Amino acid sequence: MIFDELPGNATTETQAIRIEARPLEACIVLDLHGDQFTYPYTSSLKTHVETLIEQGHSKFVLNFSDIKMVDSFGLATILSAMKLARAAGGNLALCGVSEAVEKLVKLTHLERVLDIWPNESQAAYYLSN
């Protein structure tokens, strides 16, 4: 199910990544589709989050199940989206991260900042309580 609250459609698509938004509990799950969350395609996530915040949403689960690789621009975009969510009184959590993405997060010590859960239900529960 695609969450159809964005103007036009809840799907943002670029050449390398497609983002679908849908509700789950008190959160919005952003499903990222594509192999890589890398420059120059990362900016669509921030735009998506900004639009949803303008609509009153502030709790986001980023579902990385389809993403196999993230670069430094991808990490910076995730942090930027988290900062936006927190400024709006919410938060952001990740789920479904690949082993390679998890290694990068640990290498950069971002596991201290990012909340990573095995699945979207656990992430949504965390954000909803």
Image: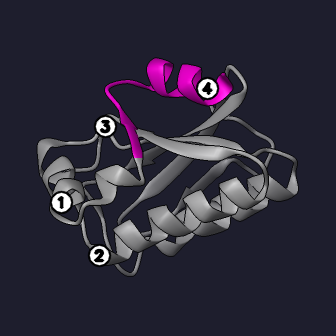
Sequence order check: which comes first, mark 4 or mark 3?
4
**Disc 4 designates what residue?**
1
Q: Residue at x 42, y 73 (%)?
A: 76
**Disc 2 designates what residue?**
72
Secondary structure found at label 3: loop
Of circles 4 and 2, the one toward us is: 2
Which corner quadrant holds the C terminus? top right
Q: CA distance from mark 4 to mark 3?
A: 16 Å
The kind of secondary structure the magenta stretch mainly shows is helix
Q: CA distance from mark 1 to mark 3?
A: 16 Å
Q: Label for residue 65?
A: 3
Magenta span covers which residues? 115-129
Sequence order check: which comes first, mark 1 or mark 3?
3
Residue type, numbered disc 3:
Ser
Secondary structure found at label 4: loop
Crowd around label 2: few <14 · some 14–19 · many ≥20 (10 Å): few
Q: Is residue 19 left or right of residue 116?
A: right
Secondary structure found at label 1: helix
Q: CA distance from mark 1 to mark 4?
A: 31 Å
Secondary structure found at label 2: helix
Q: Is residue 99 left or right of residue 19?
A: left
Residue 7 in sight from this viewpoint = no
Residue type, numbered disc 1:
Leu
Residue type, numbered disc 2:
Ser
Q: Residue at x 18, y 60 (%)?
A: 104
The reply to whether the C-beta atoms of the residues labelled 2 and 1 are less than 8 Å apart is no
